[in-house]
């Protein structure tokens, strides 16, 4: 896509978003929407500033980032490692394939009772739930990326005396599967944020708990503040990851 086309696309997106916010504001002011249930967009900056001044915003964001980061790292590392091992080791793949099919359809939130029993109402429980959701995304993307590698590459490696497992992993599997693995990592970033709020609903300090407190008081403006906070944090993480991904895959260009 050329630079003028990108700029035009960005402008259209910005105008559409601004139009949606303006329509939202107008609908509330003319009474089309109930003002006691839906906040005015113009109120949101003031509410955010009040949360920041009270120190609440920073506290809950740091709390969520703590178990989000732990769950993201654990789920990503284990998902990539197990997925690649399954793709490269047929016996390991056969040994656990039924177990993976059994556990995969179970959503992360279904593990909340066990998380509470095993870890209590702690950040460890939240990190555990987040890691489950992130694990399966990275598992299947890594598995598929490695399985998609042409067998001809491995035959060439064997012909040059590089047929050992370590050599194949370092010189063929990881480089060839890198785009797919990084794609899974990027998807995991979003999955982690979708799970973090739900993981905090049972009492762990963080964005999710603050949103539940606000909803109980019908403070919908506070709820929207933290919805937008999650969106902004994800956008920041995604932007930084894309910069890293382009640098890592620069050799493909």
Image: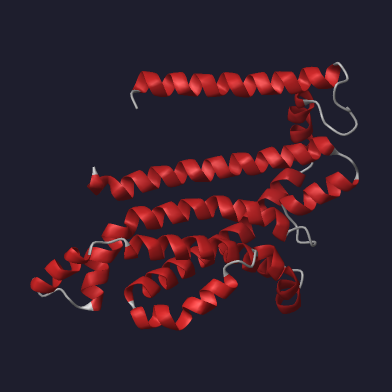
Q: Position of residue 166 (x, y in %)?
A: 25, 75
Q: Position of residue 214 (x, y in %)?
A: 84, 45
Q: Residue at x 70, y 53 (%)?
A: 197
In which image quadrant can residue 85 be found?
Answer: bottom left
Q: Nearer the viewer, residue 60 or 17?
A: 17
With respect to residue 191, does 158 lie above or below?
below
With respect to residue 140, does 65 lie above or below?
above
- Left or right: where 157 falls relative to 176: left
- Left or right: where 130 falls relative to 26: left
Q: Residue at x 69, y 46 (%)?
A: 58
Q: Nearer the viewer, residue 191 or 73?
A: 191
Q: Nearer the viewer, residue 132 or 118?
A: 132
On the rendered image, what quadrant is the N terminus found in?
Answer: top left
Q: How is the image coloured?
A: secondary structure
On the rendered image, what quadrant is the C terminus found in?
Answer: top left
In which image quadrant can residue 33 be found?
Answer: top right
- Left or right: where 120 falls relative to 4: right
Q: Residue at x 80, y 20 (%)?
A: 27
Residue at the far left in the pictured view: 160
Number of numbered markers: 0
With respect to residue 48, does 238 lie above or below?
below
Q: Position of residue 57 (x, y in %)?
A: 73, 44
Q: Position of residue 38 (x, y in %)?
A: 83, 32
- Left or right: where 190 falls relative to 207: left
Q: Residue at x 66, y 41 (%)?
A: 229
Q: Residue 215: tell me if it is visible.
A: yes
In which image quadrant can residue 235 be found?
Answer: top right
With respect to residue 76, does 94 lie above or below?
below
Q: Residue 63: tell me if it is visible.
A: no
């Amino acid at each position: 896509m050329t630079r003028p086309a990108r700029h035009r696309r960005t402008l259209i997106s910005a105008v559409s978003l601004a139009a949606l916010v303006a329509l939202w504001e107008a609908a509330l002011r003319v009474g089309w929407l109930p003002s006691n249930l839906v906040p005015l967009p113009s109120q949101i900056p003031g509410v955010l500033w009040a949360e920041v001044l009270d120190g609440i915003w920073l506290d809950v964001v740091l709390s969520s980032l703590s178990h989000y980061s732990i769950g993201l790292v654990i789920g990503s590392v284990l998902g990539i490692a197990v997925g690649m091992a399954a793709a490269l080791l047929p016996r390991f793949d056969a040994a656990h394939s039924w177990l993976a099919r059994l556990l995969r359809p179970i959503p992360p939130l279904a593990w909340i009772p066990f998380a509470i029993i095993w870890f209590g109402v702690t950040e460890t429980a939240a990190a555990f739930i987040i890691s489950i959701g992130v694990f399966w995304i990275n598992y299947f993307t890594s598995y598929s990326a490695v399985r998609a590698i042409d067998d001809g590459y491995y035959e060439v490696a064997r012909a040059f005396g590089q047929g050992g497992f370590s050599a194949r992993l370092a010189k063929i599997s990881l480089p060839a599967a890198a785009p797919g693995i990084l794609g899974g990592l990027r998807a995991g970033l979003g999955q982690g944020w979708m799970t973090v709020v739900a993981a905090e609903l049972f009492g762990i300090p963080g964005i999710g708990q603050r949103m539940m407190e606000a909803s109980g008081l019908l403070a919908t403006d506070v709820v929207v503040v933290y919805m937008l906070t999650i969106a902004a944090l994800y956008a920041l993480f995604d932007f930084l990851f894309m910069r890293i991904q382009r640098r890592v895959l620069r050799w493909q260009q």
